Amino acid sequence: MNIPRIVIAGTHSGCGKTTAASGIMAALTARGLKVQPFKVGPDFIDPSHHTIVCGRESRNLDPFMMGEDGVRDCFARACAGADIAVIEGVMGLYDGVDGSDCSSTAHVARLLDAPVILIADIKGMSRSVAALIRGYAGYDPRLRFAGVIMTKGGSARHKAMTTGDLPLPLLGWMPRSDALAVESRHLGLLMGDEDTRLRQIGSFVEEHCDLDAVIAAAGSAPQLPAQSPSSGGSSPRTTIAVAMDAAFCFYYRDNFDYLRSAGAGITFFSPLADQLPQADAYYFGGGYPEVHAHILAQSPCIPALRRAADAGIPVFGECGGLMWLSRSITAADGTRYPMTGLLDADAVMEKRFVALNYVIGTTTATSPVFPSGMRFRGHEFHYSRTIPDSDVRYLFALERGIGIQDGKDGILAGSVLGGYTHMYFGAAAAEALCRQITRI
């Protein structure tokens, strides 16, 4: 497999990595290249910007959740038909799980044998920039560095003071531009379809970066070993309706691929506006139900979803989906909004995050959604706290992660399951889910 590829890595979170990566993607796309975007780690928001910019679905690359072979497989599948791959890193270049190398940007760069461009925030620095870059470039000799792009630059004099005695080629020097800063809210940046400023950043990167050198660096990546072709989707044996709108928009796109390969036909709908479609199961991902709670409280889907649950049709909610399946959401201003009431619990928004962690768990019993003893991995990140009734039944036992409380996650009520874990399915969980659905 011979695909030009480059990793855009940062010195730390907030260094301008997303701006640089999205700008490079936009500039390459403007030149007529088919750019396949990726994001290291479990993040949902940055990929939404990549997808808007490139017109191709951005994919997560996360060895902790996917395994190293899973990273290679995802990369190969997603790059079909692409001219170049641009991989945005996570946090600082060497920051992995619990301070280790696992799932760091460096880890993924090594797995894909991809050259690295280091993004260095130079605000408040001069000659020390060279020492900083030298430290990053020399820390892991297994990495191949293509160069450095400096961000948050000041005056022409500042440029002169920061670009001497560099250990790596200077591929760009980007002055600070408040106009290009993307707005944030409690879970991070606004989604890609809510803030379009990163779409206009391509010309900014073209002006301040050596895009030809970036393309050449990506083209220097060696050929990767061929991956075994993934099985294509079989004839649908079941239909899963997936909520997809501004309230429910956090999904790993690989999960849809795995579900289709396992025999699921997928249809998308909006609980904010649509009637509930007919399906064999319903899947509500994470997102921002608290932002849209006033609309969701009047959703036309609620009566039909209650009837579906009464009929034993599987309903699965993750994080925001858990909140939607609960009795109510209490917003940060204290306003309480009724939700579907399918689970005996209430969600309350807090002022800071309640959980941010990778998850490892096991299902403790057979349910209409998953079988007993199924191992899974995923991620949790939320500002809400779910308060369940004392007699609720939990399906997930977590050996890593908080879940709803004390390592217990996945409230099960009949055919309805809701938890905080954003599960990365993989082939096994997707097959198990489809198998359970078809048995109903």
Image (tube, rainbow, N blue to C red):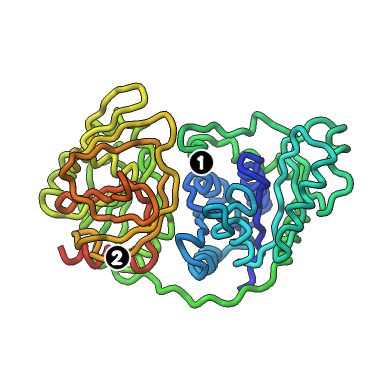
Q: Quadrant of residue 142?
A: bottom right
In this rendering, the answer to whether 146 lies above or below 199 is below
Residue at (25, 61) in percent of width and height = 370
The residue where tag 1 is placed is 192
The percent position of residue 268, horizontal first and vertical second, equals 33, 50
Q: For the N terminus, give its image quadrant.
A: bottom right
Q: Quadrant of residue 3?
A: bottom right
Which disc number belongs to residue 40? none
Amino acid under label 2? Met
Residue at (27, 66) in percent of width and height = 373
The percent position of residue 250, horizontal first and vertical second, equals 41, 47
Amino acid under label 1? Gly
Which disc number belongs to residue 374? 2
Can residue 104 be seen in the rendering of this structure? yes
- Classify 10 Å Cα crowding around label 1: few (below 14), some (14-19), many (20 and above): many
Of tags 2 and 1, the one toward the viewer is: 2
Dot 1: element: loop
In this rendering, the answer to whether 71 lies above or below 334 is below
Dot 2: element: loop
Distance from the alpha carbon under mark 2 to that under mark 1: 34 Å
| Left-right relation of 370 to 425 | left
The percent position of residue 111, horizontal first and vertical second, equals 60, 67
The percent position of residue 192, horizontal first and vertical second, equals 51, 41
| Left-right relation of 415 to 69 | left
Residue at (28, 32) in percent of width and height = 329
Residue at (22, 38) in percent of width and height = 345
Can residue 300 be seen in the rendering of this structure? no
In this rendering, the answer to whether 388 lies above or below 166 is above
Residue furthest left in the image: 311
